[in-house]
Amino acid sequence: MADTKKSRISARKSPRQARSNDLVAAVLDAAVQVLRKEGAQRFTTARVAERAGVSVGSIYQYFPNKAAILFRVQAEEWRRNTAMLAGILNDTSHPVETRLRSMAHAFLQSECDEAEVRLALADAAPLYRDAPETGEARAEGSRLFQAFIDEALPLADKARRTLAADLILRTMSAVGSSYSSVPRSQEEIAGYASALADMLCGYVTAIRG
């Protein structure tokens, strides 16, 4: 395990031409398909190459090992989620409570939509979770939400705002992971998200009060 933690997960190089971009996109798409079909335990670079229709050598031009591929898939998911949440939380034309509710609904829906791949990535997390790149990739989402809480609770001291942001993020993560572990209907997701939003808004309102 010690060797795994030290594995290089950064891409060897960034694609600069359209053809290279297409290859990397095909590799990442194939990686998601392999994760869905085989799971993390049977995930290999060779299977990804076969699914993408490219050689293993072509993949190694950009990814040094399977941990790097898995990390990139995970990082892309974090990037999409961060962009989605940024669009909601940074829209100051809506009140804080409205944005918090929209965030709860969007987040839980995303967790349920991507549950299959997310669960597989959770199994693969030991391959890259201790790498510096992982912390850097996750930090952006935390900074985004902390800025939202700072705006929502301007009269609270810094320690309490930091606690509130951390508690809400941890709660959402735990709830999303647990709730999405089995298939849910759209009606179920909407109802649960509304209850989650009620709880989060109640907590923020209590601090403001």
Image: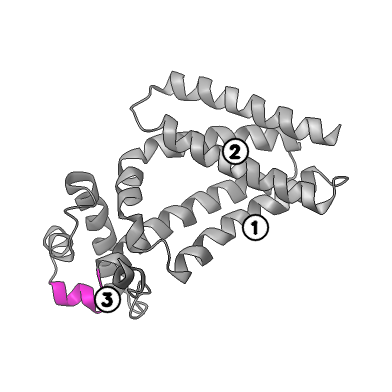
Q: Give the mark nearer the N terminus: 3 vs 2.
A: 3
* Amino acid found under the numbered disc labelled 2: Met
The residue where tag 1 is placed is 143
92 sits left or right of 186 in the view:
right
The residue where tag 3 is placed is 64
**Occupied quadrant, residue 128:** bottom left
Residue 141 seen in render: yes
Q: Position of residue 93 (x, y in %)?
A: 75, 42
Q: Which residue is at a point 42% across and 60% down the rendered structure image?
A: 75
* Amino acid found under the numbered disc labelled 3: Pro
Q: Position of residue 17 (x, y in %)?
A: 33, 78
Badge 2 element: helix
Q: Nearer the viewer, residue 44 or 24?
A: 44
Residue 91 seen in render: no
The residue where tag 2 is placed is 103
Q: Position of residue 19 (x, y in %)?
A: 27, 74
Q: Which residues are magenta?
A: 56-65
The residue carrying pointer 3 sits among few (fewer than 14), some (14 to 19) or many (20 or more) residues within 10 Å by Cα, namely: some
